[in-house]
Image: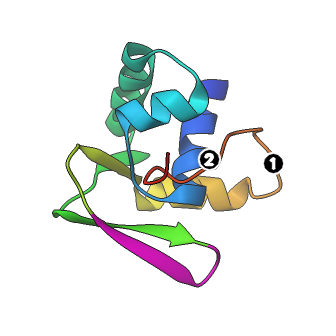
Amino acid sequence: MDELDLKILYYIYNCGPVYIKKLSERLQKDFDTIRTHIKELQGIGYVERAGGRIVEYKVGRKNKVTKHRNHTYYNLTRKGRQLMRSMSDIDMNVNLKVPYKR
């Protein structure tokens, strides 16, 4: 697992489900690079496709925003959340602006 994988997991852990295009904008990486990393993370069980048509984003600690999804969203699995909790003291220097705002 490299630094980009950790940044992807960190972003999803802190902002909630995200689609590849928005993730590539936030991390300033090529779309195909992000897609490859997402597929690898999915293969090892850290990321999964988000089910359903409605997605909820974290806004602060207690609030959520609900949005209809038009893309394929990805979320952390239980294994991915456990990894991020165990690494809670790291700062990945990632743009944590949530995906539903421009």
61 to the left or right of 19: right
Q: Mark 2 Cα within 10 Å, few/some/many (few <14, many 20+)? A: many
5 to the left or right of 94: left
Q: Which secondary structure lies at badge 2?
A: helix
Q: Is residue 28 magenta?
A: no
Above or below: residue 82 compared with residue 49:
below
Residue identifier under label 1:
90
Pointer 2 with pointer 1, Cβ within 8 A: yes
Q: How is the image coloured?
A: rainbow
Above or below: residue 24 compared with residue 55:
above
36 to the left or right of 27: left
**Residue 70 in the image: x percent, y percent?**
20, 48
Residue identifier under label 2:
10
Which stretch is magenta?
A: 60-67
- Residue drawn at point x = 39 percent, y = 46 percent: 47
Q: Is residue 64 magenta?
A: yes
Above or below: residue 30 compared with residue 70:
above
Residue type at mark 2?
Tyr
Q: Quadrant for the N terminus, please.
A: top right
**Residue 85 in the image: x percent, y percent?**
66, 62
Which one is earlier in the sequence, the residue at label 2 or at label 1? Answer: 2
